[in-house]
Amino acid sequence: MPSVLIASVTTADSQLGDFSAQRRLQTWLLTAFAAVALALAAVGVFGLVHYAVTERTREMGIRMALGAAPIDILALVVRESMRMPLAGIVIGLAAAAGLTRVMAHLVYGVSPTDAATFASVSLVFACVSLGACYVAARRTGRVDPVETLRHA
């Protein structure tokens, strides 16, 4: 048909790319916000553990004066500090499992109750929390028992 005017010629790949651009942007934004949320969670856990360690400096010094090894003190602080993040993970898993029906239309390519996704997110948050607890608890190994007993 010689009278048909073609305004633009593009490839199928170009049209598919234009079609999926919004989905890619949404995925990128979701990834960026998730990374920021994970960083904020790590900073929050670090801050809380650091404050708790600061408040218990005398106790740790007395424990060391009575013969506790610095590694034992570190293990005690990390073990006690991980209780709250682990409780948060359990509560978060329960809430996520409860909200799967509400958010089922938002996930693409996975089932809303995908066990691998739940497990991997929980593992990542547990590892980040453990790292934050460890970094904050390292201060306990540098407590001088003599100074602690002198100022107690």
Image (cartoon, helix red, strand yellow):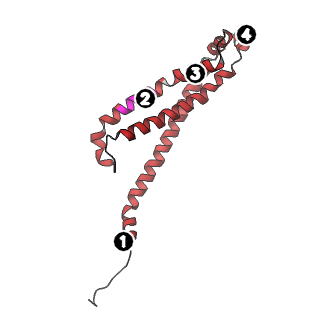
Where does residue 63 sit, x and y in percent of width and height? 63, 12
Three-letter residue code for mark 1: Ala
Q: Which residue is mark 3?
A: 75
Disc on the earlier residue, 4 or 3 = 3
Disc on the earlier residue, 1 or 4 = 1
Three-letter residue code for mark 3: Ala
The label on residue 88 is 2
Real-space Cα separation, disc 1 to disc 4, in angstroms = 78 Å
Disc on the earlier residue, 3 or 2 = 3
How many numbered circles does the render carry? 4
> Residue 141's image quarter?
top right
The label on residue 150 is 4
Q: Residue at x 45, y 53 (%)?
A: 28
Disc on the earlier residue, 1 or 2 = 1
Q: Residue at x 56, y 19 (%)?
A: 76
Per the rendered image, the range of residues in magenta is 86-93
Real-space Cα separation, disc 3 to disc 1, in angstroms = 59 Å
Q: Is residue 91 above or below residue 148?
A: below
